[in-house]
Amino acid sequence: MRSQGQVRFIKISTRVQVWAASAVALFLAVWLGTMAVMTVNSYLASRDRLSLLAREAKVTSAETRVSAYKDDITGVSAELRRRQDAIEKMVGSLPQDIMAGETVSDSSSEAAKTIDKVSAVFPEAAQLARLEARQLAFVEGLTRLADRRAKEAELAIRKVGLDPAYLLSSVDDKSAMGGPFIAFASSTDSALDQRFQRLAVSLARLSALQRGLTSMPQVLPASLEFISSGFGYRSDPFTGAGAFHAGLDFKGPIGSPIHAAAQGKVSFVGQRQGYGNCVEVDHGNGMITRYAHMSAFRTTLGKDVLAGEVIGAIGNTGRSTGPHLHFEVRINDQAVNPRPFLEGSTRVQKQAVSAIGTRN
């Protein structure tokens, strides 16, 4: 230290320096620790406060919505009524009259009593009771419509000589079904209202008949004017002896197109003894159509084909005396006469499709 021209020296021992440095370091450590604790506590407090605010906001929102439903049950009913109006407009007019032989329930009388009771006990819910009555009437009307269209489809099927029971057998066929069980119920006690169950059965029955109509031969595989041999017993063209002919023969030039008589899946492409080059189409419900003596194939195994799609060409392969198409319709591997299908298919199919698919 310099003072008044004189220089003095102060000596600090190593021990003192160590103690001083330690004290400063300890002070800094305590200060930093305190600041860290304060920062963490502040963050945790802020986080808890935000979480509490979020929970309060959620509770407030739910309470607000419940309050809104309580205060505006009329508005909720009006919204549901508009939805019901839209559904009924999409479906169109439904039969409300009950015809002889129909087994569909009529809940209109009981529903009117329900509306009166609810209106007396809980006036605010009268709108909902009226809406429920409309839904039941809608379900019952839809069931009547499904049953009537199913009856028309049955009549169309019988006109071609088939038993609708063959087609309806697929309704109860559970040989290729699966998946997780997901219960469906129309009430809080997990019970399906019988009226909804009745509708489901009617729709399933109608669907099976519709599939049957679609799978029925409805397109001529070749020109009907050139049938050279009919279905049934005839004189064999090779031996002259009596023999059973399981299909129809359509005479035509080699290479003329052969059309699928109905939509389905090609189940066979190849040669069969006596048939020569042959194609078979599976139409479901045990029905197949067979096309034989082809000169060329125009389809492949497993292909989905539409009614009228070209699947081959007329030829003279197999046991044949000249170029023609041999056409068979088989149900559960039993040959049936194709002629009623082909002669009535255009008229019957148009009537059935019109009745089932276009009326609303």
Image: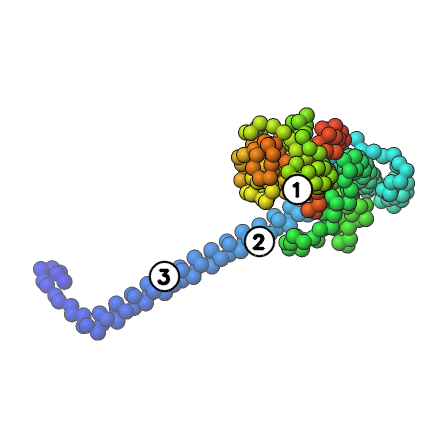
SS label for mark 2: helix
Distance CA(mark 1)–CA(mark 2): 70 Å
Q: Which disc is residue 52 wearing?
A: 2
Q: Kindly identify the residue that appears in the image at 43 percent across and 61 percent down.
A: 37
Type of the residue with mark 3:
Leu
SS label for mark 3: helix
Marks 1 and 3, the one that precedes in the sequence: 3
Would residue 82 be seen by someone viewing this image from the given angle? no
Would residue 276 be seen by someone viewing this image from the given angle? yes
Q: Kindly identify the residue that appears in the image at 18 percent across and 70 percent down.
A: 12
Q: Kindly identify the residue that appears in the image at 9 percent across and 60 percent down.
A: 5
Compared with residue 47, is residue 127 higher up or lower down, i.e. above or below?
Answer: above
Residue 165 placement: quadrant: top right
Q: Please rate how many residues cluster around mark 3, counting C-alpha atoms within 10 Å: few if below 14, some from 14 to 19, many from 20.
A: few
Q: Nearer the viewer, mark 1 or mark 2?
A: 1
Marks 3 and 2, the one that precedes in the sequence: 3
SS label for mark 1: strand
Q: Would you say 300 lies left or right of 40 here?
A: right
Type of the residue with mark 1:
Ile
**Residue 174: image location, x then y, percent:** 69, 53
Of residue 275 and residue 87, the one placed in the foreground of this image is 275
Q: Which residue is mark 3?
A: 32
